[in-house]
Amino acid sequence: MPAVESGANPKPTPPAVPQVGSGAEPNATPAPRRFALVGGTVVGVGRRDITVQGANIEAVGQAEAAIERIDVSGSYLAPAFIDAHVHLTYFRAAEALLSRGVAAAVDLAAPLDSLTLSVAPLTLLQSGPMVTAIGGYPTASWGSAGYGLEVASREAAEAAVDQLFKAGAAIIKVPFTGEPTLSDEIASAVVARAHAHELKVVAHALSSAEAERAANAGVDLFAHTPTGALTETTLAAFSSRAVVSTLAAFGGSAQTVANLKALRARGTTVLYGTDLGNTRDAGIQASEIELLELSGLDGSAILEAGTSAPARYFGLSSLGELAVGKRAAILVLAEDPQAEPKTLAAPRAVYIDGQIRR
């Protein structure tokens, strides 16, 4: 935790208890807390104070003299992260994510009734169950308790996508791994129906053949960096699409690292993701950051992969940067993450919506 200026309090100040006869309304809503993080360096911008009012950033620049001030001198300020691949029904770790600097996550497979799950203030975009073949992945293994929605025809697949959309799914997931899998015709129908609802489609595809099928079906992104060597055809097909890293979740093999490096070199958008649930390190993972570095991403690119890139890709316009009007989702770091990316995994302090979580 950064040092605090004399008289300042890093934790939310509880509202005063109204006194009888004071004229205060006993049930009045307290005014939003207003304070400033002063003396720090906004990454990529320079020395700036950040003024917070309630849940949002009010100003970036020199703070007012009279405001409550929290001294973060010598620290670097960066946006909180977005984890583009988690399973929070499988591994309930929302509080740990928040306390370790993750403000939003994308849940890529959970039972249908999980679409009503609220883990606020963590923003959660959810796919619900994967649309899969009868007996297909993951219904015969870890996802047997409703993590797959099984279909046997084009019509059933389109109905499944409609059902997920009406239930609140923000993205559709299709597995291409193992046997049985959806036919090419049915997989393409899933993608077309999802796109008709303006939903992106994410593919679980690990081998080169699976990745090529996913590309041919028209999916928008890989849920994982594929682990098998990718053909030039697949690399070219994904040059304008996206990939969620999840390198540590699959052991960070040399081939997987090479695949991510090759995809990025061809223009694929890289999104930070951990496959939390398969992994159990809830928060910004040092192991994932280290593997991203091995894949050729420098500190600026890693920060982008965890903040502004997923914010743009998933339409999370209130996150991804420290700017006026954005959510006050702020990492206070010991070092500049552009020079030392692993500092992201050990923040001195974390603020989510103006509330200190760490």
Image (tube, rainbow, N blue to C red):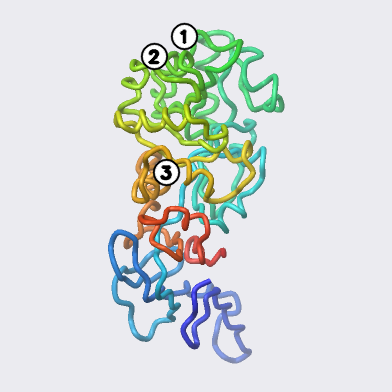
Q: Which mark is residue 88?
A: none
* Nearer-N-terminus badge (1/3): 1
Real-space Cα separation, disc 1 to disc 3, in angstroms: 35 Å
Using the image, determine if residue 54 lies above or below residue 281: below
Image x and y of residue 56, in percent: 41, 63
Q: Residue at x 50, y 18 (%)?
A: 207
Using the image, determine if residue 41 lies above or below residue 160: below
In the image, what residue type sits under mark 1? Asp
Give the quadrant of residue 113: top right
Between circles 1 and 3, the one closer to the viewer is 3
Q: Residue at x 49, y 80 (%)?
A: 4
Give the quadrant of residue 221: top left
Residue tagged 1:
184
Q: Which mark is residue 216?
A: 2
**Circle 3: element type:** helix
Image x and y of residue 315, in percent: 38, 42
Residue tagged 3:
293
Using the image, determine if residue 171 lies above or below residue 178: below
Q: Residues within 10 Å of mark 2 (few under 14, many from 20)?
A: some
Real-space Cα separation, disc 2 to disc 3, in angstroms: 30 Å
Quadrant occupied by the C terminus: bottom right
Image x and y of residue 302, in percent: 39, 46
